[in-house]
Amino acid sequence: MNILVTGANGQLGTEIRNLAAGSRNRYIFTDVTSLPGVETVHLDITNPGALKIVCDSEDVDVIVNCAAYTNVDKAEDDHVTAMMLNSTAAGYLAQVCAARGGTLVHISTDYVFHGDIPSPCKEDWPTDPLGVYGSTKLSGEKEIEKSGCRSIIFRTAWLYSPYGRNFVKTMRTLTAERDSVKVVFDQVGTPTYARDLAALVVKVIDEGMLDRTGTYHYSNEGAVSWYDFAKAVCELSGNSCDIQPCHTAEFPSKARRPRFSVLDKTKVKETFGITVPYWRDSLEDCIARMEGGGLH
């Protein structure tokens, strides 16, 4: 099969690139931007004409959509761009898949939920986004459903990796440079190591499980606050910074965030026969890769 990956230079796309290197399937990695030394086909997914040309020329069977507008606060002032990338473009990808008889694997978010119930979120729960980012991602899910294409949607949360910009890399830097740092303790969720999610995506494709369509939740196991997550990052990085818990209200931001968005993984584990790693074990692996230079 021919697999087209969008947003291939981002965190998840890069990890898929790493893990798919030995696949019997052919992966075509695309992005609107380029990175030095990384072979990527240029593709603007907001251009339906360009999208069709690439998919036809590469005879694409599956699209993995890792592209998104993920700046949660900036999205509040840039609704048009966020909607274009997170919803309209998702619709274009779905339409191409529907026309070709292909399958779309799409990445969504825990931010489609309000986060006001202290229990792990299940796939069939009512959605109620708090801000523009969540609402545009939810709109993208609806565009995919409307297209009628075969699709698998993975909602994930708190994504991090050795690549790009993310909480783990920021905390490693701050706790190395500062004597103390404040981190909110009243937002609880579960981090997702991009390599673990990438392994699931590659498994589903390479082991012929694309017929198991639907919406699934995937993050690492466990539940943790941003404060506890930061403490673990600091400790595993060998830093001695004093991390203090604080309330969300002490750090006002444009976008409201879910207070509790732990994802229930029962469905994804049973459907695809996987074991989901514990969040701290995956964090240890990520930091070991960053410190050991094992970025492959």
Image: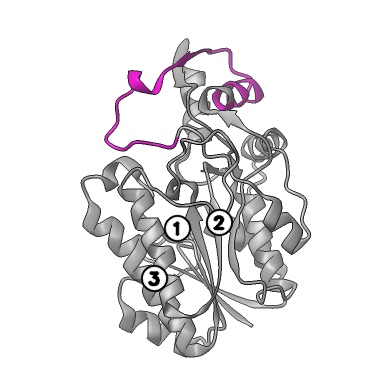
Label 3 vs label 1: CA separation?
A: 34 Å
**Cβ atoms at labels 2 and 3 below 8 Å apart:** no
The answer to whether residue 275 is above or below residue 290 is below
Q: Range of the magenta residues?
A: 229-258
Task: Locate residue 267, reporting x and y percent.
Answer: 68, 56
Of the residues shown, which amino acid type is indicated by label 1? Answer: Pro
Label 1 vs label 2: CA separation?
A: 42 Å
Task: Locate residue 4, reporting x and y percent.
Answer: 52, 75
Q: Pointer 3: residues within 10 angstroms few (<14), some, or many (20+)?
A: many
User: Which residue is tagged 1?
Assistant: 36
User: Which residue is tagged 2?
Assistant: 124
Of the residues shown, which amino acid type is indicated by label 3? Answer: Glu
Name the residue rendered at 55%, 56% in the picture.
Answer: 124
Tag 2's secondary structure?
A: loop
- Nearer the observer: mark 3 or 1; the answer is 3
Label 2 vs label 3: CA separation?
A: 17 Å
- Nearer the observer: mark 1 or 2; the answer is 2
In the image, taking residue 177 as reference, residue 44 lies left or right, namely left
Q: Does label 3 or label 1 sit earlier along the sequence?
A: 1
User: Which residue is tagged 3?
Assistant: 143
Residue 22: in sight, yes or no?
yes
| Quarter of the view holding residue 252 | top left
For the N terminus, the image quarter is bottom right
- Nearer the observer: mark 2 or 3; the answer is 2
Of the residues shown, which amino acid type is indicated by label 2? Answer: Asp
Q: Would residue 262 be counted in the magenta stretch?
A: no
Q: Does label 1 or label 2 sit earlier along the sequence?
A: 1
